[in-house]
Image (cartoon, rainbow, N blue to C red):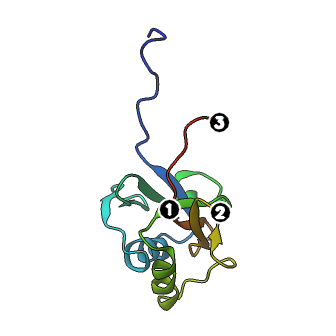
Amino acid sequence: MTTATPLVTGTDFVTVSTRNFDAAVEFYGTVLGLPESARWGRMPAAEFETGNLTIAVMESEAFGLEFRANNHPIALRVDDVAAARAELESRGVEFKGETIDSGVCHQAIFEDPDGNALDLHHRYAPRTSGA
């Protein structure tokens, strides 16, 4: 491989750890309404589509891994944070504080049943170039 050939060409999925596979499938599939696209054979893992990134939920111990909840949120793009938040609250989701207005986006942070952080996100200002 040369330096002109990239080693990494994309991201296939991000993994979210769970202790209770059935509860995770219910949450991501029914509560969040994400389409389930794959199961990992007989192993307790499934993939859910968000439109541009696949979220895989995986029962950690079945794969010989220690369960650890992710405390930094995966930002889920929505058209309207307030409307999406209200809908999820009606489905029993509890949010961590008020909706954030950063000056470029709105965000509302919540957790899945295992404590993995998720974030409803809507960017309302254009991205700027530069650092």
Disc sitting over residue 1 in the figure: none
Looking at the rendering, in which quadrant would you find the N terminus? top left
Mark 1, residues whose alpha carbon is within 10 Å: few (<14), some, or many (≥20)?
few
Q: Which of marks 2 and 3 is nearer the N terminus?
A: 2
Query: Could you tell me how far apart the alpha carbons at marks 1 and 3 are, in whole angstroms?
Result: 19 Å
Helix, strand or loop status at disc 3 = loop
Q: Which of marks 1 and 3 is nearer the N terminus?
A: 1
The image quadrant of residue 108 is bottom right
Query: Where does label 3 land, which residue?
Result: 131
Query: Where does label 2 land, which residue?
Result: 102
Q: Which of marks 1 and 2 is nearer the N terminus?
A: 2
**Given the image, on which type of amino acid does mark 2 rest?**
Ser
Helix, strand or loop status at disc 2 = loop
| Front residue of this view, candidates 34 and 56 | 34
Query: Where does label 1 land, which residue?
Result: 124
Left or right of 55: which side holds 93?
right
- Identify which residue is drawn at 42% across, 77% down: 26
Is 70 located above or below residue 7 in the figure? Answer: below
Q: Which residue is at the far top?
A: 2
- Identify which residue is drawn at 31% across, 67% down: 35
Find residue 55 and report its horizontal and vertical position in percent: 44, 57
